[in-house]
Image: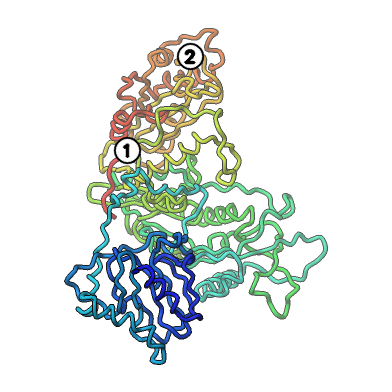
């Protein structure tokens, strides 16, 4: 009877209601049906809890009803697949307690199913038989009489997923690799590469005007009409940002340069050699100045190459951006040298040399870039490296007079006390002078994008040895003439990593009065795995200060360790003799207490020096043998044996383990630089 009444109620629905029992959809679908004149009905099992009609039914004015609100699962229809816009898992329904207030929606009691009205806002003109059964069932349902059902607050989702991190899964951020040829983009102004880029900045326009006016004031050229047969050289502007020793901005420098590669030998240039001061000479003079507490002054010559007079006829085009509007086709006949010309450095050196000789200086025979002024008890030294000049002497007034004379003849900038010379930072303290290359190392690491590199304790690994064999480096843009392997690439980066940790290390020049010369010499016999050539190394000391060092590969294969050590000994003897000759021409009232000593750790080489032993096996090194023997017989030097553990030059011949390397480094004289 109950089943027939259910069917009777279904058949009483309006004909316009498009409901088909086999196509009823589950509760979690989103399909909608149009109901023109009757409220929607939903067939649900009686064993499911009642749902709040107000929370599930759409407004009465809506023409479409969601099937998820009106179509619960039915045994008469198979479950349909979830919609593409819907989660495949229907939301969980919370059980409704029996004492909870019921929805005002009516329902028809049935053992298996019930018909529940899902909208309280039925149309007023709907037939009375459509709402009659619902009202009757509502009065019979005690739960429906208790009022609307209040949904419980949503529960917090339970996160059952175990927390994990990249480090727990051994996932690390890959280290970004940079090319050694890459340049770091700094936050300062970029140096322009073309004239158009420079003209956009007021700094560079002012810098170019300053350079051009300086050349006009010096009468660097004369404008002449071009003629056939002239080799006219192009010109261009070069831009550089100059920094002080602490890295701060100094000035914007513009230079007009000639494209010297277009010059023709015999027409545009002749001799081009120009000497510069040797680093050994510089350290020797610094040692003497600190030992005797002399002042150290530094000068910079402005537009140095424009001071030299040319002996040849050289024609260049007018400077870009500064062409004479009245004579646009004319060319510049140079009266003085211009940057970029092959003979420009020599022309400047000869001009400076002539003037220094005019005011009483003499050119040193040991180093032609060292000029010495000796008048009675006055002694002044001038060291020249292109346009960088260092002046020192035992008379402060004489030093000031020399600086005044140079400023009168040339455009000179007085930089005061020596602080930064040829990439070397000089820090003077009451104890002595500290020399370091902190700024140079930082600039190098920044240029190679390795300023954050992890430091290492030694510059080279003991193993494996570098060989030609191996996988070639994959990126050809990161090297030039050589074809390195991956091992060579890693070795080069290791040197930079070593520099990153030793940027503050320095050489300390003390005020010790000891000026005796001694040296250490060593050789790594057959150290090259490719051609088995040996490596020479030496360190020459003036007192307790190293002033000269070298590490070079021999030109031939040595057949024994004694032969390799003897060749290294001969090279060291030549360097020691040159240092002694340099000291002898400085005009110091100083004589060495004993001949220079060369320390060697090879007994065979030491024995050959002390005894006139010569046989057929030593013919191929006869020149080296006789040179060393002559120096010893004349009393100019002495060779002594030393233990291998005390051989300081051993650090320059091959890679060493960390403990041995640091021990020798301290003995050589490397220390920590003071804060600048």
- Give the quadrant of the N terminus: bottom left
Looking at the picture, how far across and down is residue 509, in whole percent? 30, 43
Residue drawn at the location 38% of the way across and 84% of the way down: 129
Q: Relative to the observer, which residue lies in front, 650 or 641?
A: 650
Identity of the residue furthest to the right in this view: 228
Residue drawn at the location 23% of the way across and 75% of the way down: 141
Measured along the vertical axis of the image, is residue 573 above or below residue 283?
above
- Give the quadrant of the C terminus: bottom left
Q: Relative to the observer, which residue lies in front, 537 or 69?
A: 69
Measured along the vertical axis of the image, is residue 50 above or below residue 590?
below
User: Which disc, if any, is residue 560?
Assistant: 2
Measured along the vertical axis of the image, is residue 480 above or below residue 196?
above
Tell whether 309 sits left or right of 399: right
Looking at the picture, how far across and down is residue 674, in whole percent? 26, 50
Does the rendering let one see residue 380? no
Identity of the residue furthest to the bottom in this view: 125
Q: What secondary structure is marked by label 2?
A: loop
Measured along the vertical axis of the image, is residue 93 above or below residue 136?
above
Distance from the alpha carbon under mark 1 to that under mark 2: 32 Å
Q: Disc 1 or disc 2, which is closer to the eye? A: 2
Mark 1 vs mark 2: which is more N-terminal? 1
Q: What secondary structure is marked by label 1?
A: strand
Residue 481: quarter of image = top right
Residue receiving disc 1? 545
């Amino acid at each position: 009877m109950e089943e027939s009444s259910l069917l009777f109620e279904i058949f009483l629905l309006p004909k316009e209601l498009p409901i088909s029992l086999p196509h009823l959809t589950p509760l979690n679908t989103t399909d909608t049906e149009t109901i023109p004149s009757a409220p929607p009905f939903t067939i649900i099992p009686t064993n499911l809890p009642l749902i709040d009609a107000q929370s599930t039914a759409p407004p009465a004015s809506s023409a479409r009803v969601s099937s998820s609100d009106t179509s619960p699962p039915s045994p008469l229809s198979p479950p349909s697949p979830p919609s593409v816009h819907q989660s495949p898992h229907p939301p969980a329904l919370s059980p409704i307690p029996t004492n909870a207030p019921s929805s005002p929606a009516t329902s028809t009691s049935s053992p298996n199913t019930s018909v529940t009205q899902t909208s309280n806002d039925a149309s007023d003109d709907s037939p009375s038989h459509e709402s009659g059964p619902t009202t009757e069932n509502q009065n019979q349902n005690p739960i429906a009489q208790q009022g609307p059902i209040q949904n419980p607050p949503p529960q917090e989702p339970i996160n059952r997923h175990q927390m994990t991190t990249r480090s727990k899964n051994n996932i690390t951020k890959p280290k970004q690799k940079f090319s050694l040829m890459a340049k770091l983009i700094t936050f300062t102004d970029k140096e322009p590469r073309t004239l158009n880029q420079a003209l956009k900045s007021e700094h560079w326009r002012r810098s170019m005007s300053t350079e051009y006016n300086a050349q006009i004031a010096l009468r660097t050229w004369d404008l002449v009409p071009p003629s056939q047969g002239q080799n006219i050289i192009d010109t261009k502007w070069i831009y550089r940002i100059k920094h002080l020793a602490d890295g701060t901005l100094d000035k914007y420098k513009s230079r007009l340069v000639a494209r010297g590669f277009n010059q023709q030998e015999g027409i545009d240039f002749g001799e081009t050699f120009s000497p510069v001061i040797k680093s050994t000479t510089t350290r020797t003079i610094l040692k003497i100045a600190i030992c005797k507490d002399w002042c150290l002054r530094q000068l910079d010559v402005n537009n140095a190459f424009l001071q030299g007079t040319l002996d040849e006829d050289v024609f260049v085009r007018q400077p870009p951006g500064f062409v004479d509007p009245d004579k646009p086709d004319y060319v510049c006949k140079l009266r003085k040298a211009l940057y970029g010309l092959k003979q420009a450095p020599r022309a400047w050196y000869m001009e400076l040399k002539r003037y220094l000789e005019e005011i009483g200086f003499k050119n040193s025979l040991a180093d032609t870039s060292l000029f010495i002024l000796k008048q009675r008890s006055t002694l002044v030294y001038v060291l020249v490296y292109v346009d960088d000049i260092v002046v020192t002497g035992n008379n402060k007034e004489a030093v000031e007079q020399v600086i005044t004379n140079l400023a009168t003849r040339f455009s000179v900038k007085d930089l005061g006390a020596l602080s930064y010379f040829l990439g070397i930072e000089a820090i003077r303290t009451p104890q002595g002078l500290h020399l370091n290359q902190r700024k140079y190392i930082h600039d190098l690491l920044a240029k190679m994008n390795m300023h954050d590199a992890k430091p290492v304790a030694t510059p080279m690994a003991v193993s494996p040895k570098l060989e030609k064999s191996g996988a070639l480096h994959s990126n050809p843009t990161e090297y030039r003439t050589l074809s390195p392997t991956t091992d060579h690439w890693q070795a080069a980066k290791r040197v930079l990593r070593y520099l990153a940790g030793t940027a503050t290390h320095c050489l300390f020049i003390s005020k010790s009065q000891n000026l005796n010369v001694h040296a250490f010499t060593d050789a790594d016999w057959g150290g090259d795995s490719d051609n088995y050539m040996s490596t020479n190394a030496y360190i020459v000391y003036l007192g307790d200060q190293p002033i000269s060092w070298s590490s070079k590969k021999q030109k031939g294969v040595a057949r024994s360790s004694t032969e390799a050590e003897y060749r290294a000994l001969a090279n060291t003897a030549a360097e020691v003799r040159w240092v002694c000759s340099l000291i002898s021409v400085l005009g110091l009232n100083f004589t060495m207490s004993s001949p220079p000593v060369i320390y060697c750790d090879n007994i065979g080489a030491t024995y050959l020096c002390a005894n006139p032993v010569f046989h057929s096996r030593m013919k191929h090194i006869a020149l080296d043998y006789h040179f060393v023997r002559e120096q010893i017989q004349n009393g100019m030097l002495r060779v002594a044996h030393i233990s291998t553990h005390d051989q300081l030059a051993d650090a320059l011949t091959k890679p060493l383990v960390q403990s041995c390397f640091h021990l020798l480094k301290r003995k050589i004289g490397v220390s920590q630089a003071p804060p600048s």
